[in-house]
Image (spheres, helix red, strand yellow):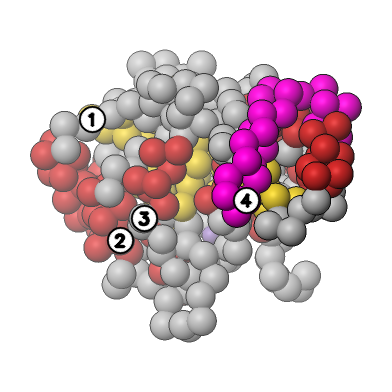
Amino acid sequence: MILILESSATDDQVQHVVDRVEVLGFKAHLSRGTFRTIIGIIGDEQKLSAEPLSAIPGVASVVPVLPPYKLASRDAHPEPSIVDVSGVKIGGGHLGMIAGPCSVEDSDRMYRIAEKVRASGANLFRGGAYKPRTSPYAFQGMGEDGLKLLRDVGEKFGMPVVTEVTDPRLVGLVGEYADMLQVGARNMQNFALLTEVGKSQRPVLLKRGMSATITDLLMCAEYILSQGNMNVVLCERGIKSFDPATRNLFDVAAVPLVHQLSHLPIIVDPSHATGRPDLIPACAMAGLAAGADGVHVEVHDCPEEAKSDGPQALLPEQYDELASQLKQLAAVLNKTISPLPETLA
Ligand code: PEP
Ligand code: MN
């Protein structure tokens, strides 16, 4: 951490800053220039970040040297992390292909969709049993019956399953059925939920909040990692923008940027990012080309009857075409789509 002092800072103020730094248990390294004095603070920067250093009289600005997250940073772990979701690897050249309807719905439909996306090459099946909806009157999900159905479908087709957990009190229950716990965009900063999924040891799919910066996203991952759960996969799913032409704004640059800053895998979700089936294939390909460790797509066999997010669903045949393009691109990029596990744990 570096403190830059005001040009008008008096000798007494400079001494007071040094004393304050030392009282906090750090060493201060004073450097007087012609116009400005700067103070380098030596010690564990993360411990200092909560201190109101800019409130000390004479301090003009506080410049951190390290990012505020530690366990999520590349410095802590130079090699890319590989997250194993019941046998399906994500990261380090292994691609996760998550597909399925937005919500868990009636049984026949779930089996039909899963069979199709599996045949196309998806290796993780998704569906929400607890849905975070903007309207309290909209379909809220099937709850535990949905979890059971999702699990049965996953077992029938040998696919690990991903589903959202919306409440810290449900982490235990959802973790009994799901191979991977999704923390949705609206809950990215639900710190009680992050702490609970951090304790659960189940792999976590952490979606970027719609108004979250990259630092916010990595700090939320840090909450999970700091509980001892290192199995975190990030997801870029679009951020708010001024333009209603797409549901959100697909921030493809987040992918290579997160890879620079962190060892955690990051996948893309062009379904929620664009909200438009006509744009999903191009954005999925762009995400993969930018280095994403997987692609998450919502698929439904009758979008007009979908309980949620029907307008953005790809039909199974559209997903099939996209999956074959993604496979070709993966080969060019020297990445492999993780095979399905031989047996589901
Ligand atoms: C979802 O995956 O269906 C979902 C609600 O996603 P997000 O949290 O990204 O909106
Ligand atoms: Mn959805």
Q: For mark 3, what is the residue?
A: 253
Mark 2 or 3, which is nearer the eye? Answer: 3
Which of the 4 image quadrants contains residue 218?
top right
**What kind of residue is marked 1?**
Thr
Q: Give yes or no for contact between labels 1 and 3 (Cβ–Cβ under 8 Å).
A: no
Q: Earlier in the sequence, mark 2 or mark 3?
A: 3
- Residue 290 percent location from the top left of the image: 27, 49
Task: Give the residue type that dot 4 points to.
Answer: Arg
| On screen, residue 39 above or below 316 | above
Query: Is residue 35 one of those drawn in magenta?
Result: yes
Residue corresponding to mark 4: 36
Q: How far apart, in angstroms, are the residues tagged by discs 2 and 1?
A: 19 Å
Pointer 4 or 2: first along the chain: 4
Return the x and y of residue 230 as percentages of the image width and height: 57, 23
- Report the side of 314 relative to 249 (left or right): left
| Front residue (pair 20, 109) | 20
In percent of the image, x 70 and y 50: which residue is there? Answer: 5
Crowding near the residue tagged with mark 4, few <14, some 14–19, many ≥20 C-alpha atoms within 10 Å = some
**Type of residue at label 2?**
Cys
Up-down relation of residue 74 to residue 63 (above or below): above
Q: Which residue is mark 1?
A: 336
Provide the residue designation for mark 2: 283
Could you say which disc has been placed on residue 294 in the image? none
Which of the two marks, 1 or 3, is nearer to us in this view? 3
Q: CB of residue at label 3: within 8 Å of ligand 1?
A: no
Q: Residue at x 62, y 51 (%)?
A: 36
Between the C-alphas of marks 4 and 1, the distance is 54 Å
Contact flag, marks 4 and 1 (Cβ < 8 Å): no
Report if residue 210 is visible in the image.
Answer: yes
